[in-house]
Image (spheres, rainbow, N blue to C red):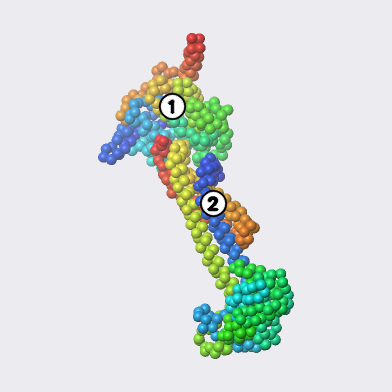
Amino acid sequence: MAIIELRGIKRHYILGDITVKALRGIDLDVESGEFVAIMGPSGSGKSTLMNTLGCLDKPTAGSYVLDGLETSRASSDEFADIRNAKIGFVFQGFNLLSRTSALENVELPLFYDRSGSTIDRRQRAEAALVGVGLGSRLDHKPNQLSGGQQQRVAIARAMVTDPAFILADEPTGNLDTEMSLEIMSLFQELNERGKTIVMVTHEPEVASYTRRVITMRDGAIVSDRPVALRHNAALDLADWKERHAALAAEEVAS
Amino acid sequence: MTVGKLASASARSIFRNKMRSFLTSLGIIIGVCSVIVMVAIGSGSQAQIKKQIESMGTNLLMVMPPRGPREANRMTMADVTKLRNEASYLSAISGEVRLSSKVVGGSGYWSTTVYGVEPDYMVIKNWAIGSGEFFTDRDLARRAKVLVIGSTVATKLFGDEDPLGKPVRIGTTPFTIVGVLKSKGSGNNGNDQDDVVMVPLDTAVTRLLRDGKIQAIEMSVVREDLMDAAQAEVTAILRESHRLSDGSDNDFDVMNQSEIIATASQTAKTLTSLLAAIAGVSLIVGGIGIMNIMLVSVTERTREIGIRMSVGARKKDILLQFLAESVILSLLGGFLGISLALALSWVLSTFMSMPTIISPAVIAASVGFAGAVGVFFGFYPARKAANLYPIDALRYE
């Protein structure tokens, strides 16, 4: 079943006299359970596509069916509800509320839940944090957490509403190798469990942990192919740690 | 978001920034506090004025010359006599003249007010004799050169000595002291009521003033419910005495006690409203302070707004969140202001002998006004926050 169906999506910006065509007619299907990387140089339109997929921006033309729901004529309130119920965002800069505990950050989307369900926000948020391995850091504020941990809080926040898919924008852009591998292995794990993930990145290594890579250029998709040699982030992480330990030991020996 | 969730989210963000929240509310705190204290002082002094005027005497009726030049005064001893003979609702009546004069005697002299009155004056004005006795109708008839003095005058002229029987002079006229009045304390403007000398009315009119005019007529009415009837009767008798034709204006003013109270408290009331209005301006200034901080806060928290929008906050949610913050700030300021006002008026009335009356209506009104200020001045910043575009807000550095 297709979670995302884009048909002829165009996005034009008018800057004074010139019209910038950020997206020139995108057709794209993402099935449930896929793990897709969107790549391309800056200015290729991948950020605009991400904003469109995330219902943060309305396309100039075209149709976007999300989880069976046509969104192109939605109002801003309906957009907000779709973001709340269907999409889990993970950003490059984490975008957590500062001076607010991990638990409260994860609870935030549930504040705006309009389904009327009588959920226990705290319990759901705790479960989501346990799910990303932060069960012991519920009351930590973002500034008391490492970058990798902050990103995991953000992933827990994205997961807490059980969205149709996770939309990640350069999720490892601010992280070092070890933390990046941690985050990618978490994404792979979530994907194994059936979560659909769409990730924007410009790093080929990061894309190699996904299942499908879409490359954009000048507002259009230029290639769309499955990942032939899929890497396993958990194994790479173990491998990296081993090499790192060996390197450290060598340094001590000399 | 429900109201509870909204309030708790707003309260949390207010308490995250304790110092700034306090400074923001300070304008409201001071505004609410000053409104309440001003009104409390105003109504306190009004009540005090009323109490003191009532202590001047009971069921008091007073005739005064009209406002204007002294020559317009046409009241004479004959009016007093006519009233005494013809008025049916009066239990006591006394003509009155006043002059400021030096009283010489004992160790030196003392400048005071000399009242020419009749014996009934004691009853009408609630005076009591401390030692000796008050002069009598016989003293009036004889135009006797006797007088009674207030306790202040007694102390100033004679110190610890007994002033009874001692000679004093008013101007060049020699008098003998026959009595000392019991102390009455200070009056409604803080004036010393005991700084007084009383001589028989006829003596004053013939020997001291020599113009034959009466400056006031003081009367006590038998019962309180007869005040209006008494006032009408006194007016009619005086019009007849002055031979005023129908349709012409009175050449005197008859005032009863409640009118005197009304006149005196009118001034206090005007002053109170003026002070409260000035204090009200400070509430508005406080509101502008809240708007200022809320605008800064919206800019500062643009990213937070973006995050909230990305996880599903509607425009209305953001609007209500910021509006709730400014209303909570104002109400908090309001409640702190009330506490401060209560403390302040307690200090004023306890340690500075300034009577204060705090009315629940004023408290309710100022809290209501504080809340309204919060809504009014919080709306613009809140709308600014709600109208942010999620992508721009998320990218804001």
What percent of the width, then of the height, locates residue B188? Answer: 61, 69
Residues under numbered marks 2 and 1 in contact, where contact means CB atoms less than 8 Å apart = no
Query: In this image, B292 relative to B87: left or right?
Result: left
At a point 48% along the width and 57% down the height, the residue shown is B281
Q: Which mark is residue B11?
A: none
Residue B79 is drawn in which quadrant? Answer: bottom right
Helix, strand or loop at mark 1 = loop
Screen quadrant of the N terminus of chain A: top left
Of all residues, the one furthest to the front in this rendering is B107
Q: Is residue A63 above or below residue A242?
A: below
Q: Chain of mark 1?
A: A
Crowd around label 1: few <14 · some 14–19 · many ≥20 (10 Å): some
User: Taking the image as drawn, is residue B108 in sight?
Assistant: yes
Residue B29 marker = 2
Discs 2 and 1 share one subunit: no
Q: Which quarter of the figure has residue A80?
A: top left
Q: Nearer the viewer, residue B307 or B29?
A: B29
Rate crowding at label 2 as few (under 14), some (14 to 19) or many (20 or more) other CA atoms within 10 Å.
many
The residue where tag 1 is placed is A174
Q: Residue at x 46, y 43 (%)?
A: B297
Q: Position of residue B276 (x, y in %)?
A: 52, 60
Tell me: residue A195, above or below residue A228.
Answer: below
